[in-house]
């Protein structure tokens, strides 16, 4: 059992003492300053000089006011009628524009002399009128600044005179304005940025704070709403969309599950608005496809182990950010109708899709609500054969209902309530005709499926979030309570290695949690930054029963309490440091149970005494990023992740009578990464190399009879990722990505063994061309390549163990085209597998199982029409 060693406890205690000391110091200092200007004043003066008024006000407030008599007309006659009026309001009335020159130091107020300089403020927005967050704004010769999430910016201390003001962001044309700055005056400017490509410089919330992607010392991939919509026109499964577009994520599987779709060879933690969807205690491999693309505003993928979130993030995080309540009308929305099928072999392949989104704002209340309903027809390969139905998407019915409402109490605080339910089941009148691995594929033939429909019967997510941006010390608070209920029904099998007779399992997970997140800025001048800190409390009850009532995995009742802190420091303007700590304190309670019989009359069943398993670990992260040069923006980072991955598999395969005799220690993942991004002229390039190690692993290996068990051996995974985007013309953009990953486990005898295909994907490359020949028409051509990987020898009989099959290269081309008839009406055409390539998906190749050796989709066309109002 892994515990926190003593020196880690001492470090944690020491850091806590420092944090308390600093908090007390800053509260006393800053709060004292705030109290001066908020102090109520009661004073009646009539027709006195300004000098007399300032003296009287200072005495009444107990705060001397210093100034130079040459700064303004001190003999000007003024009057005061204040009764419990804040000092700031009294001074603002007396000083007018000179009020902005106040400097407060403790209980002393100074009216600063004129510097002869001015100020530039403004707003940056996109072409559709939405705020452009984290855009770089600057004047040559002055320090640049970035817009906040509302698109606002401010530049102070600008010399009076004419200047050229620039606003720039990745994927947008640089906007320039000539401005004139007057002494002691403020120039207010509005920029509108025109998008030139698919990339935009967006904020990243998966790290729990809103920040520029350029300041994150790790690899990040962002999919915005436009990119998601383009890919959904081709294939509306979110797991397929991510498999096509995200470097480092395993290729798509053409299935309802995401088996083998790891991130950088390790488990990925899937979130919806920060709520965990993954079931790491027993991975059901249905967490990536747990939401419909129609309700997603963007997807943020943070790569590499992370200590800012908890259990299951050894490979990184996928965070689905749902649509926000917004809009400047009481009601507006979008209606989409679509159909799809395989034109070359149309019979029974027709499907349809309906989605509706409504949103609006009424006074302080805003909302968004919507839903989608989707039916897939029969899927066929390039030759017209019906695909095998093994957890496939063929003949799948799915829907997603979603609502989110927000109430704005004031400019700095709001309350948000959200609910989403996702349902997807395969209801088919086909059954599998098993093929022979490496010789002929499995296909679907007419027949009655004997079990219950496989898929996701329910995925409910609800949360309530309170936000306040105006706490003392300019602290931002976010407090969220959430509930998640997830069911995953696996396919029916006639026989299994884990139990006797036929059966069908279902993974059940109930999560309840509270997240407290605070962010406090600190410092100024040469060193400044923020501290993000808080605590996560999670209760997760996961089990795996059979639908006939037998219990495969008993209730695993986990409680996890995890405080954390993350420091960000902006040093000397261009050097960004981030470092953090998280303490995982988890317990898992498992009652007495019997393993399932593997033969008749209870043969092979083992009575197991339950236990309360305790897990404690302190995990760290640290990183640096240098941001001075757009052409060379490097980073280096170290981060750790915590995981109780596949605990359920260990429990259900118990061969001991007591749980405490099993090796259930958590996986602590260490991720080392170095990378760089580069922007110059029309190009945007990124590169990253990483090494990921762990003293324990959970690589699933075939024990010899087809039964997969976790291999608890040290692991080392490494790889690299490259991306390139070129904005050649305002209407022409091209780009490409390449990702390579490999990994090995070290066995007890010292030999090193490659990780199986369920963990390590073959090399993956993508490319795209975006072209708009006219304003109303947009064309996108995509290429996806998965390469070769052959690491294992066949058995003596010529077959391979499960998950050790060789994979051969696959090339696919997809097309999306959209035509805008008006601002409100648009039609789209998507084609998956444009050239009707006959191929075996990556999953069916590496699995090396006869029944799962199936072909991929033939050419499939989707047509939709959208109306916005």
Image: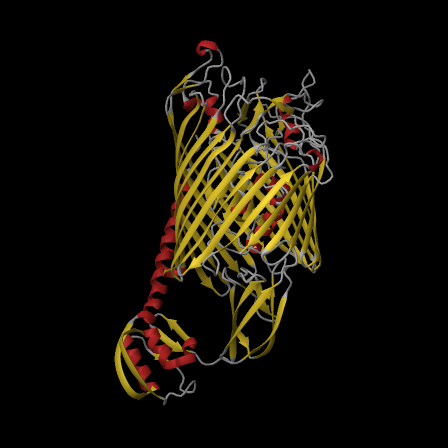
Image point (65%, 24%), residue name: 442
Image point (50%, 15%), residue name: 501
Q: In the displayed image of the protein, which residue is found farthest to the front?
A: 347
Relative vertical location of residue 424 with respect to residue 107 in this rendering, above or below: above
Q: Residue 672 location, x and y as percent? A: 58, 43
Relative vertical location of residue 284 with respect to residue 215 in this rendering, above or below: above
Relative vertical location of residue 286 with respect to residue 26 in this rendering, above or below: above
Q: Residue 325 location, x and y as percent? A: 46, 54
Name the side, left or right, on which 246 lies relative to 406.
right
Relative vertical location of residue 52 with respect to residue 781 in this rendering, above or below: below
User: What number of labels is visible?
Assistant: 0
* Along the viewing direction, whichever of 563 and 345 lies nearer the viewer: 345
Image point (56%, 22%), residue name: 448
Classify residue 615 by image quadrant: top left
* Along the viewing direction, whichever of 244 and 796 lies nearer the viewer: 244
Name the side, left or right, on which 722 lies relative to 301.
right
- The answer to whether one can see residue 535 in this image is yes
Image point (54%, 18%), residue name: 494
Q: Quadrant of the N terminus?
A: top left
Q: Residue 711 location, x and y as percent? A: 55, 26
- The answer to whether one can see residue 801 in this image is no
Classify residue 383 by image quadrant: top right
* Along the viewing direction, whichever of 44 and 448 lies nearer the viewer: 448
Q: How is the image coloured?
A: secondary structure
Q: Residue 140 location, x and y as percent? A: 61, 71
Name the side, left or right, on which 584 lies relative to 228.
left
């Amino acid at each position: 059992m892994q515990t926190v060693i003593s020196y880690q406890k001492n470090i944690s205690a020491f850091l806590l003492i420092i944090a308390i000391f600093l908090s007390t110091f800053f509260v006393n200092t800053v709060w004292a300053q705030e109290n001066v200007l908020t102090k109520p004043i009661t004073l009646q003066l009539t027709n006195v000089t300004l000098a007399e008024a300032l003296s009287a006000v200072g005495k009444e407030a107990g705060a001397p006011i210093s100034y130079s008599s040459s700064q303004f007309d001190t003999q000007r006659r003024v009057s005061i009628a204040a009764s419990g009026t804040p000092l700031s309001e009294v001074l603002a009335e007396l000083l007018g524009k000179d009020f902005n020159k106040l400097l407060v130091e403790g209980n002393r107020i100074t009216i600063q002399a004129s510097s002869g300089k001015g100020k530039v403020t403004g707003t940056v927005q996109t072409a559709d009128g939405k705020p452009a967050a984290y855009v770089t704004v600057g004047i040559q010769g002055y320090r640049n600044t970035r817009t906040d999430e509302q698109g606002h910016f401010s530049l102070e201390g600008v010399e009076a005179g004419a200047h050229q003001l620039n606003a720039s962001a990745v994927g947008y044309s640089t906007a320039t304005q000539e401005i004139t700055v007057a002494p002691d005056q403020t120039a207010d400017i509005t920029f509108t940025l025109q998008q030139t490509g698919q990339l935009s410089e967006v904020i990243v919330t998966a790290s729990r704070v809103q920040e520029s992607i350029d300041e994150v010392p790790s690899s990040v991939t962002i999919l915005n709403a436009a990119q998601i919509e383009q890919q959904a026109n081709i294939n509306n499964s979110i797991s397929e969309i991510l498999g096509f577009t995200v470097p480092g994520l395993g290729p798509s599987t053409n299935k309802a599950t995401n088996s083998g779709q790891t991130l950088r060879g390790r488990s990925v933690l899937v979130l919806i608005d920060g709520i965990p969807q993954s079931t790491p205690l027993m991975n059901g491999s249905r967490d990536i496809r747990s939401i419909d693309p129609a309700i997603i505003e963007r997807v943020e993928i943070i790569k590499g182990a992370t200590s800012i979130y908890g259990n299951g993030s050894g490979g990184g995080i996928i965070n689905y950010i749902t649509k926000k309540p917004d809009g400047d009308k009481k009601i507006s929305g979008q209606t989409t109708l679509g159909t799809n099928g395989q034109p070359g072999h149309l019979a029974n392949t027709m499907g349809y899709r309906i989605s509706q989104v409504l949103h609006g704002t009424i006074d302080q209340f805003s909302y968004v609500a919507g839903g989608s309903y989707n039916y897939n027809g029969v899927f066929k390969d390039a030759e017209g054969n019906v695909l095998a139905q093994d957890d496939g998407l063929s003949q799948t019915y799915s829907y997603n209902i979603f609502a989110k409402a927000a109430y704005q109490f004031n400019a700095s605080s709001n309350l948000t309530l959200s609910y989403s339910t996702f349902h997807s089941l395969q209801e088919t009148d086909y059954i599998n005709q098993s093929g022979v691995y490496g010789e002929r594929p499995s296909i679907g033939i007419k027949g009655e499926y004997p079990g219950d429909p496989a898929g996701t019967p329910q995925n409910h997510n609800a949360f309530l979030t309170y936000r306040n941006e105006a706490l003392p010390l300019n602290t931002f608070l976010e407090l969220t309570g959430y509930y998640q209920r997830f069911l995953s029904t696996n396919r029916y099998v006639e026989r299994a290695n884990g139990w006797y007779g036929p059966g069908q399992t279902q993974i059940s997970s109930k999560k309840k949690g509270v997240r407290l997140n605070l962010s406090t800025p600190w410092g100024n001048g040469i060193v400044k930054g923020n501290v993000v800190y808080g605590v996560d409390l999670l209760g997760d009850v996961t089990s795996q029963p059979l639908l006939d009532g037998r219990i495969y995995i008993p209730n695993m009742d986990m409680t996890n309490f995890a405080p954390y802190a993350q420091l960000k420091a902006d040093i000397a303007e261009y050097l960004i440091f981030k470092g953090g700590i998280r303490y995982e304190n988890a317990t898992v309670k498992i009652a007495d149970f019997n393993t399932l019989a593997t033969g008749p009359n209870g043969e092979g069943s083992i009575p197991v005494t339950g236990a309360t398993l305790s897990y404690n670990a302190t995990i760290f992260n640290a990183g640096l990023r240098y941001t001075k040069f757009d052409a060379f923006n490097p980073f280096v980072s170290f981060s750790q992740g915590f995981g109780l991955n596949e605990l359920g598999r260990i429990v259900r395969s118990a061969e001991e009578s007591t749980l405490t005799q099993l090796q259930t220690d958590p996986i602590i993942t260490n991720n080392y990464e170095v990378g760089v991004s580069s922007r110059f002229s029309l190009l945007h390039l990124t590169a990253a190399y990483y090494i990921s190690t762990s003293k324990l692993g959970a690589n699933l290996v075939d024990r010899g009879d087809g039964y997969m068990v976790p291999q608890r051996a040290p692991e080392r995974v490494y790889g690299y990722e490259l991306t390139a985007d070129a904005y050649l013309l305002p209407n022409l953009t091209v780009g490409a990505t390449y990702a390579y990953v490999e990994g090995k486990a070290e066995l007890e005898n010292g030999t090193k063994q490659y990780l199986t295909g369920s963990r390590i994907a073959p090399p993956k490359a993508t490319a795209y061309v975006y072209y708009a020949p006219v304003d109303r028409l947009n064309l996108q051509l995509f290429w996806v390549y998965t390469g070769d990987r052959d690491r294992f020898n066949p058995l003596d009989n010529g077959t391979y163990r499960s998950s050790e099959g060789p994979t051969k290269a696959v090339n696919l081309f997809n097309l999306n085209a959209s035509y805008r008839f008006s601002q409100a009406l648009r039609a789209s055409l998507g084609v998956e597998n444009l050239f009707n390539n006959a191929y075996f998906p990556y999953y069916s190749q590496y699995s090396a199982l006869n029944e799962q050796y199936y072909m991929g989709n033939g050419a499939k066309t989707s047509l939709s029409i959208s109306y916005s109002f």
